[in-house]
Amino acid sequence: YKAVDGQKDTVPVGYIDQVPHTYGYWEGAYPLVNEHGLGMGESTCASKLVGFAKQAGGEALFTIAELMKVAMERCKTARCAIEVMGKLSVEHGFFGEDPGEAGAGESLSIADGDETWIFHI
């Protein structure tokens, strides 16, 4: 993206390490399945801990949708997705997409051809 006359350059809110190759995935409101058959289903849930986005004065970079996208792009297995999303959440922070305790948490069902996991954050 390059700003044109009358526009301001967008300043990134954060960075993550890049990888040499990513996988394609299909999505609806959230990512659904990638080219290797890794699938996810999402459900918002309550949480006692509430994170806040960097844009709102907090420290967190990731929502669940963004974590899912990165995992779909980088992983072939459910186990890999759990590890990638967990690591990114710890390193860069997580905030719920809905306001307050009622929407601060997320639960994902993550499956591949061999394993199924639940990711709760």
Image: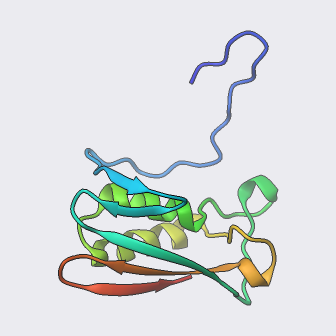
Residue sitting at the far front? 28
Q: Quadrant of the N terminus?
A: top right
Residue positioned 31% across, 58% down in the render = 74
Q: How is the image coloured?
A: rainbow
Residue positioned 74% across, 90% down in the render = 48
- Where 104 sits versus 68, above or below? below
Q: Quadrant of residue 116?
A: bottom left
Residue 89, given in percent of the width and then of the height, sits at: 53, 70
How many numbered discs?
0
Residue situated in front as seen by the camera: 2 or 26: 26
- Where 99 sits versus 33, above or below? below
Q: Quadrant of residue 94?
A: bottom right
Residue 34, given in percent of the width and then of the height, sits at: 30, 59
Residue situated in front as seen by the camera: 94 or 112: 112
Residue 104, given in percent of the width and then of the height, sits at: 70, 78
Residue positioned 61% across, 68% down in the render = 93
Q: Quadrant of the C terminus?
A: bottom right
Residue situated in front as seen by the camera: 84 or 116: 116
